[in-house]
Image: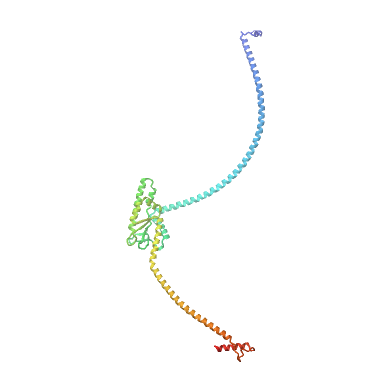
Amino acid sequence: MSALSSFGLDLSDPVHQVLLAVLALGLGLGALVGQAARRAGRESAALRRDLTALHQAQAESKGAHALATQAIDARMTGLSAELGDGLAQSATQTAQTLGALQERLAAIDLAQRNIEKLSGDVLGLQDILSNKQTRGAFGEIQLHDLLSKALPPNAYRWQATLANGTRADCILDLPDPPGAIVIDAKFPLEPYDALVAAHSNSERKVAARAFRTAIRSHIRAISEKYIQPGETADSALLFLPSEAVYAELHSRFPDLVREGFAARVWTVSPTTCMALLNTLRAVLKDARMRDEAQAIRTALRLLHRDIALVEERAGRLKSHLAQAQGDLDGITIAATRAAQRMDRLDDLDFDDASGLSRPDAAPEERDASRRDVRIYRR
């Protein structure tokens, strides 16, 4: 306080108090400024060190960046080459894949055309089978194909009329027994189609009932029309040109098959019909052998007679040959004797005036003399 009084300051004076406060504040501020300056100096030195380290790090970073840039460039070059090779290979594979795809598309297009054609054929077949007359013609064509492969042409007749006025699709002319067998080529397809198209149990029951009624009526009609005692066999054939209908009939309606057996109407499919026709061909062959047995016996009897004549004439020829051989032997003996006599005559020596033994005689004279002697001796 005395120090402040020496400066002429009165603490009771508000002005002086303010001045003192301002002075104290200035002194505090100065201390703070000094501390801040010292701190700033220290921070400036640290900042300079940091800047130096930063410059060094920046320089090192530039070198590392350059190395990294070079490595990246090399890597990019390698990647570019690999990418180019990969793209070229991918392009080749893509071209091959596209070629194969094009071939498959062409095959698919061809298959599509075949399917369309087949669909048209199926629709045409459906149109054929939807009409009773065309369906009967279809069954007859298939049956005709089977018959032409299994039997000779004279073993069957088409559209033949029986004595009761009914016309049969085909009649097999077999020997008695069994006799002529009639084949009916028509079949009830509409009930079968309804049975196949049925979805619910009620629909299936109704379709099965209709199918059973149609088959039963057809069997009864065949039995009444085509089994005529004295004219046909005691059985007939119901030809089903569809294996599906045949399988459905035997698998789900065995009672109808038994009814057909009772009515002597045999139901056949293309497969079973071919087996039956092969059996009938054997029957026809046996019947033909029986018919030709008499002709065979006659031919054997004539053959036996011809063999006897051959034996007789061979014996005569043998006797003639033996006689001729005897004559030849006699001729040979006579010729041998004549040759021997001629040799003896040639060896004779005559001493007479004929001059045969004269050495001065000419050869012509000697030969003439020998001829004279031979003539004389004969």
Q: Nearer the viewer, residue 299 or 25?
A: 299
Residue 367, by quadrant, is bottom right
Residue 164, by quadrant, is bottom left
Q: Nearer the viewer, residue 5 or 374?
A: 374
Q: Is residue 359 left or right of residue 324?
A: right
Q: Nearer the viewer, residue 340 or 140?
A: 340
Q: Compared to 357, does 41 lie above or below?
A: above
Residue 159, by quadrant, is bottom left
Residue at screen point 55% across, 88% down: 377
Quadrant where the N terminus sits is top right
Q: Compared to 196, does 277 lie above or below?
A: below
Where does the image place residue 366, in percent across and percent down from the top left?
A: 61, 88
Where does the image place residue 297, in percent across and percent down from the top left?
A: 39, 69
Q: Is residue 372 left or right of residue 129?
A: right
Where does the image place residue 113, in percent across and percent down from the top left?
A: 48, 51
Type of colouring: rainbow
Quadrant where the C terminus sits is bottom right
Where does the image place residue 105, in percent across and percent down from the top left?
A: 52, 48
In the rendered picture of this protein, how many numbered marks are placed on residues? 0
| In the image, farthest residue toward the bottom | 353
Residue at screen point 64% across, 18% down: 35
Q: Compared to 119, does 341 lie above or below?
A: below
